Amino acid sequence: MNDKSKYFLTLDNISAEPIHIQISHRIKRAISDGSLEHGERLPSTRVLASELSVARGTVENAYALLMGEGLLISKGQAGTFINISSNSLEKSKPVPDKHSVKNTAQQERSFLFQPGCPAYDVFPRKTWSRLVTSQARKQSVTALSHRDAMGYLPLRQALASYLRLSRGVNCEAEQIIITMGYQGALDLLIRCLSLSGREVCMEDPGYLFASQLLRAAGVNIVPAPVDEHGLDINKAMALTPNPSLTIVTPSHQSPLGMSLSPERRVALLEWAKTTGMWVLEDDYDGEFRYSGYPLPALKSLDEAERVIYAGSFSKTLFPALRLGYMVLPTSLVDIAEKYASLSYQSLPLATQQVVTAFMAEGYFALHLKKMRALYAERREITADTLTNILGDYLQVSSYKNGMHLVTNILSDEQDKDVAERFNRQGFGIQALSDWTTNVNENGLIMGFTNISSKMAAEKTAKQLRQCFTHPG
């Protein structure tokens, strides 16, 4: 048995606590007591599932929970690793076991208010299961030997059609590469563009886990400020006149929520054209906009072919898929295929086939339409509830897009302290100050997609209120 598997031998099949929650708690406890340390590799989901005699999806769900909390990080084919360099888990405060907590299953609340999670309660599981079974039955001998490092061609064709229609991205299937989520895409770009030791400009605040991956690869990150119009291009150019890459979230700035203005989109593309830098457009949840018309992707304006467009199914479907993709400028296709062939980092064929069928049979478009309406409703419920119950503690951002909202703290209370107190109860909110170098940023990043009712919102908001010591 794998050495790391010893931490999971106490699984209780009789307990009301779900197995994937038990696994995640065991990993947290092992981190707490020092048995698992930063950088250690965990068993693969297949291996651990086999050793514990549980479904592989159960282990994937446990790992996905911990990735959402920043305790684990996936490095594609290299595996899944402990990542505790910047989390709030304290060794002096171990995770309670089942003997010290009453009804642990009911107290597991990590999806409520956790940013980046789709609505798990409304995912069409029956349809998905039917497609999984159908694709398995139709598996051909040819498919068993599939080795296209760029990814399953029918999926890339489906993505090209979808992106042309929904995001205004004029691309061909040959320009698309399937990756192990957004992290897999970023990892591949680090190698393709030889970014180690070079300057990469990032929005500040910016996506926390991207900056962690870049720093681990030896990239010199230059944080550039954002305002109500998105990335300040002039200040970015002053800070780093000629970076190798600039990473932006133009449809829904991560995490603050504003969109990059049309004028700055033009300025950014002109900067790229003039200097020859690349631009990575992270369109992580651009499909979800609840007021006005959906904004076209920055890539749709890219006449000079300097924009690399990155998308993911983690938020439109579910994160355990770990399925992402990039639309590459034609000049990068060959080198990306070369490095992808060396690492063979795309997902198993069966997963790609199921997603292809889900898109081809129209379920993907229907699911997105349903989610837009549902998320708009859940956002309003959450924002109204937070204002009513925590209005003297928090100010809710007015941006109506994406899958999370940002709340500014109105007192001298530190966001890290509030988030830590709240997350000890099983939640997974993020402190805004962890995402920025700006010492004046003090707020909470909170998801709303799994707030299924006003009652759930009110109950959770009251628990959050108790984590403040005094109002502003």
Image (spheres, rainbow, N blue to C red):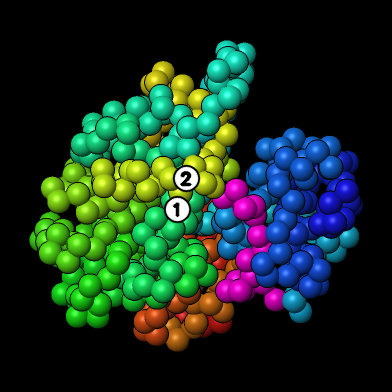
Q: What residue type is labelled 2?
A: Ala
Q: Mark 2 points at which residue?
A: 340
Provide the secondary structure element on which disc 2 rests: helix
What is the crowding at mark 1: few (fewer than 14 residues within 10 Å), some, or many (at least 20)? many
Q: What residue type is labelled 1?
A: Leu
Q: Which of marks 2 and 1 is nearer the N terminus?
A: 1
Locate residue 330 relative to residue 310 in the image: left or right. Answer: left
Q: Give the range drawn in magenta.
A: 76-90
In this view, 75 is above or below 177: below
Residue at left offset 77%, top offset 43%: 47
> Closer to the camera: disc 2 or disc 1?
2
Give how far across and how far down residue 17 sits, in percent: 78, 47
In magenta stretch: residue 455: no
In magenta stretch: residue 85: yes
Residue at left offset 45%, top offset 25%: 356
Q: Name the residue under label 1.
A: 188
* Quarter in which the C terminus is drawn: bottom left
**Closer-to-camera residue (272/317):** 272
Residue at left offset 58%, top offset 24%: 145
Q: Is there any visible trace of residue 208 in the rendered image?
A: no
**Closer-to-camera residue (382/243):** 243
**Closer-to-camera residue (242/373):** 242
